[in-house]
Image (tube, rainbow, N blue to C red):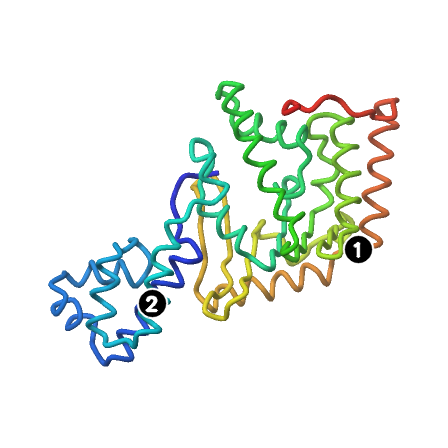
Amino acid sequence: MATEQSPTVRHRRLARQLRQCRERSGLSMESAAAALGWSRPKLVRFETAKTRPKLSDVAAMLELYGCDEAIKLALMQLARDIRKRGWWSAFGDVLAGSFAELEDDAVQIRAWEVQFVPGLLQTSDYALAVIRAGNPDEPEEVNLRRLQARMARRAILERQSAPALVCVLDEAVLRRPVGGPEVMARQLDALVDVGKKPNVSIRVMPTGIGEHAGMDGPFVILGFDSPLDPDVVYLEGMGGEIYLEDVEQVSRCSVRFDRICDQALSEQESAALIKDIAKEYRKSHGSSASPIASPLA
């Protein structure tokens, strides 16, 4: 993943609340900045979550805006919470925490993928093949660290408060033999198994459908529990990470995802196709694709 930072969920919430407090106080951006002894750009960075404010900065803003004590206490605690370390902090050498934290806080994840199985659903040997392909010049120990981080991500689907995951895969993802036939057969078996979870839906866009709503490329829509945290669309490519938070842009992506789902196979049809393709891999390899030792074992 790219290393460009994006505001975390709690940071975005704090920025939004601080802006709303200022607006309720009747202060303009210019007058508030002047009263605080700051430049206007500094206040803009705080209110747009471009810069994390110090606790003293938050306290000064809340005092100026005349917020009641309950709001002050809540927002000061929120300011402290944005500095909490999540599981991803242990992998800061190979993983940008921004997307990991958004994904960890999401209650709904909707993903459209055209190149490979999404990280949350990857087996270890499939994931290692993908990581090696994307980082061919890296030492093996670095790629194994990336693999550890990717496997740690999968834990969110096992926890009690697991998000609802709706994933639509282009059929080409299933037919691309990443890691070879044995690896692919096991990966497809794993997709079928995880698709049985009540919070997981896996669908396939069949090649035979021709043109479809997802031809512009892959994207992920992250939804959150609080109405104060609007959905975020995540895009990743050679240019790095892009996060779309504009309401109209996110709405268009949501409509696009619904159209993709409308054209994709049902869950049952998708599972049947995935099983058939897994059988093809096993037949082509001439084995039962017995498990091999994980590089993390």
Res. 201 mark: none
Q: Amino acid at mark 2?
A: Leu
Dividing the picture into quadrants, the one containing residue 120 is: top right
What secondary structure is marked by label 1? Answer: helix
Report x, y in % for residue 185.
79, 32
Q: Please name the residue that numbered disc 1 is placed on.
A: 267
- Answer with left or right where residue 124 lies relative to residue 206: left
Q: Please name the residue that numbered disc 2 is placed on.
A: 73
- Answer with left or right where residue 240 lies relative to residue 222: left
For the residues labelled 2 and 1, say whether their Cβ atoms are less than 8 Å apart.
no
Out of 270 and 17, give the one closest to the viewer. Answer: 17
- Determine the residue positioned at 61% across, 41% down: 119
> How many angstroms separate mark 2 from mark 1 (CA)?
46 Å
Report x, y in % for residue 123.
69, 34
- Determine the residue positioned at 67% across, 59% down: 260
- Determine the residue positioned at 40% across, 63% down: 13
Determine whether 227 is above or below 57 in the image.
below
Q: Nearer the viewer, mark 2 or mark 1?
A: 2
The mark that comes first in sequence, 2 or 1, is 2
Q: Badge 2 local density, few (<14 within 10 Å), some, or many (20+)?
A: some
- Answer with left or right where residue 75 lies relative to residue 213: left
What secondary structure is marked by label 2? Answer: helix
Dividing the picture into quadrants, the one containing residue 53 is: bottom left
Q: Amino acid at mark 1?
A: Glu
